[in-house]
Image (cartoon, rainbow, N blue to C red):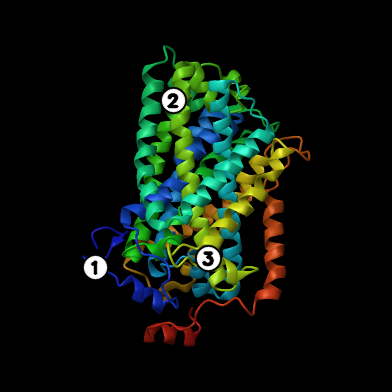
Amino acid sequence: MSTAWSQSGPAPQQDDEQRLRELGYQPVLARRMGGFGNFAISFSVLSILSGCMTLYGFGMGTGGPAVMLWGWAGVGLFVLFVGLALAEVTSAYPTSGALYYMADRLGGRAWGWYTGWLNLLGLLGAIAGIDYGAALFTGALFQLQWGFDPTPESTMVIFVCILLLHAVLNLFGVRLVSLLNSISVWWHLGGVAVIVGALTIVPSHHQSPEFVFTEFVNDTGWSNPLYVAAIGLLLAQYTFSGYDASAHLSEETSNASVSAARGIVRAIWVSWAAGFALLAGLTFAIQDYAGAQNSETGVPPAQILIDALGTGGATAMLLIVIVAQLFCGNAEVAAASRMVFAFSRDGALPGSRMWQRVSSRTQTPVHAVWLSVAVACVLALPSLYSATAYGAVTAINVIGITPAYAIPIFLRLRAGDRFRPGPWHLGRWSKPVGWVAVVWVACVTVLFCLPQSSPVTVDSMNYASIALAVALFLATIWWFVARRSYQTPTGYGTAREQAEIAEGIV
């Protein structure tokens, strides 16, 4: 093995359909996605032009430039550890169920059940957060062009239109989804280059390196700078989520045991590098910090672009960002709908028979797509009544999906040498990388349940902890109703796996 986290030698091409049958599932989805397409869906969901731009205003008040830049660098490193460890388990279990199926096989039905509900909560929260963020930026663009007033009601209308667009695009099949994601990769990388280049060349004034890398801003109401810096990590951690999309699309990917694992890791490190450049470019170009925070557009990055590039230049840059966000939301709907499909296939959701249906024409889980966008719409409805509701939606995404990443990694560590790795594995680095990942996820899960501003009121409260508690409570209630119907397959195809099941290893 040339490196610790690579494919072991020139491995033969995997028989994807046979491997899926060995894991207990009859192939029903179209396997039309290549390795680049698999990487592209996770990269599109990570979407630095969505996460970084949407939460930049949040970062400006929770630590400011110093926390945004150094926090991005630090969080990205730890997330890479999580991605490496998760990729190893994905290589062993390349199914649409992804995290919950891994947990079920390594820890048992209850582990799989709760992992699945956390993962599903995070994925649906991500659709709401991404598409509502795109609606906010679209409203800012309309205001620049036509004096449009982006009220909560009009923003919600734009949001619903975006959801419908993404539902329709996903109904055409995975080949179109893969094509759009491949375009998305180059749009994101080219978009970052154009935005950073324009912000470097056009403005006559730039902030100093000292300001960009050391300026600390605290508008939270909390006095402890360490606490403020910790909650300021939400910008980076929110953006660095969704890379499990590669695993969820594995049943539609060729050579999935290798391609899905590589897709996870590549999406993280490419986003890590490009995102740092984007954040630095924006921060160097700030002309009026307070003015950007209180922008009439409601979107601080839009004001930074207006101040630095003028209205015409800002409009062009905003268009780049909005298209990237649309790519991101479309990829997230694909990932979430596959999770809904897989969870329903194993009898975990109310109405599972409906949500697991696959179109005979496109081989797409049509009902799962519609359910995903419908729930995302419901999650964003409180934004009509509360200015802080959007922050709660992003917190729901992080608090749901981040712990779900760590559970299969922890269970893989607990299994020790009994874990049977796939063709892509970490070798001797598996345990140290895995433990760093688990500890990091445990820390950020606690961090993101903490209140983000003081004093804590109904409007300023962080509802992530409540969302997590409600999700776990409802999952527990439903467990007693559906535990007899919920069952991952037990008819595995190899003698070794049968022996492991008999010994209670998996």
**Left or right for 222, reference 217:** right
Per the image, the residue denoted by label 3 is: 341
Q: Which mark is residue 316?
A: 2
Give how far across and how far down residue 103 sits, in percent.
52, 69
Q: Residue at x 56, y 26 (%)?
A: 142
Q: Residue at x 72, y 52 (%)?
A: 466
Q: Which mark is residue 11?
A: 1
Q: Which mark is residue 325?
A: none
Q: Residue at x 71, y 31 (%)?
A: 221
Q: Residue at x 39, y 43 (%)?
A: 184
Rendering quarter of residue 117: bottom right
Give how far across and how far down residue 55 sits, in percent.
56, 36
Does dot 3 land on a helix, a strand or a loop? helix
**Left or right for 270, reference 235:** left
Give how far across and how far down residue 289 sits, in percent.
56, 20
Determine the CA span between mark 3 and mark 1.
Answer: 30 Å
Determine the CA span between mark 2 and mark 3.
Answer: 38 Å
Name the kind of residue labelled 3 in the image. Phe
State how many labels appear: 3
Asked if residue 280 is positioned above or below residue 122 in the image, the reply reads above
Residue 107 visible in the displayed image: yes
